[in-house]
Amino acid sequence: MRPHPTDVDAVRVALGFAERAVGTADVPIGAAVFSPDGRLLAGAHNARERLGDPTAHAEVLALREAARVHGDGWRLEGCTLAVTVEPCTMCAGALVLARVARVVFGAWEPRTGAVCSLWDVVRDRRLNHRPEVVGGVLESECAALLNDFFADQR
């Protein structure tokens, strides 16, 4: 059995996916989904601009692919989603609906974050599924990627 990636390792994998978006028009955010036994199921980076799709956030793309390869339909029970930036409301809703067990993220997003900062969608007691949340993992590395992207946009 392969060892479970640590939270740091998981966010590093997500950073690798985010780096694939560097030099494109898409914001370099990356996500990776790990199976309950720690195996990488899927990873993606934002592709809204490339695909012309407002839902093509890294998290949604990674969740879709992970559900396809996981073998338990759309349910990702026991899985961990690692992402470089705190998920937005759409992505937070998607990971709750996918039944992800844990979400681990790097940079906080005070303007749109929906797992701690602006909202706390994933731990709303009215929902029937509430994943564990770990934030601020490799925060400075994740934030630097975004800061560089937006500095180039100005």
Image (tube, rainbow, N blue to C red):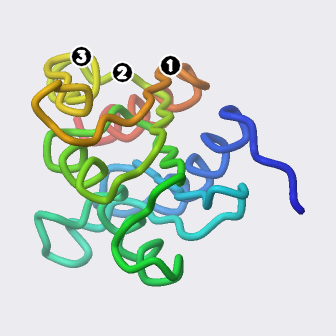
Amino acid at the residue labelled 1: Gly
Q: Earlier in the sequence, mark 2 or mark 1?
A: 2
In front here: 66 or 130? Answer: 130
Q: CA distance from mark 3 to mark 2?
A: 7 Å
The x, y position of residue 126, in whole percent, is: 10, 30
Name the residue carrying label 1. 136
Q: Which residue is mark 3?
A: 117
Please report contact status of discs 3 and 2: CB closer than 8 Å, yes or no: yes
Which class describes the residues within 10 Å of circle 2: few (<14), some (14-19), or many (20+)?
A: many
Measuring 50% from the left and 53% from the top, which residue is drawn there?
Answer: 18
- At 53% from the left and 76% from the top, the residue drawn is 70
In what quadrant of the picture does the C terminus appear?
top left
| Residue in front for this viewpoint, 114 or 30 | 114
Which residue was labeled with disc 2? Answer: 108
- Give yes or no for contact between labels 2 and 1 (Cβ–Cβ under 8 Å): yes
Q: Earlier in the sequence, mark 3 or mark 2?
A: 2
Quarter where residue 9 is shown: top right
Helix, strand or loop at mark 2: loop
Task: Examine the rendered structure and indicate whether residue 95 appears above or below residue 130.
Answer: below
Tell me if residue 50 comes above or below residue 3 in the rendering.
below
Residue type at tag 2: Trp
User: Does residue 64 appear left or right of residue 97 in this picture?
Assistant: right
In terms of secondary structure, where does tag 3 sit? loop
Q: CA distance from mark 2 to mark 1?
A: 7 Å
Which label is found at residue 153?
Answer: none
Q: What residue is drawn where x is 24% and y is 49%?
A: 91
Q: Position of residue 77 (x, y in %)?
A: 46, 57
Q: Residue furthest front?
A: 128
In screen coordinates, is 34 left or right of 22? right
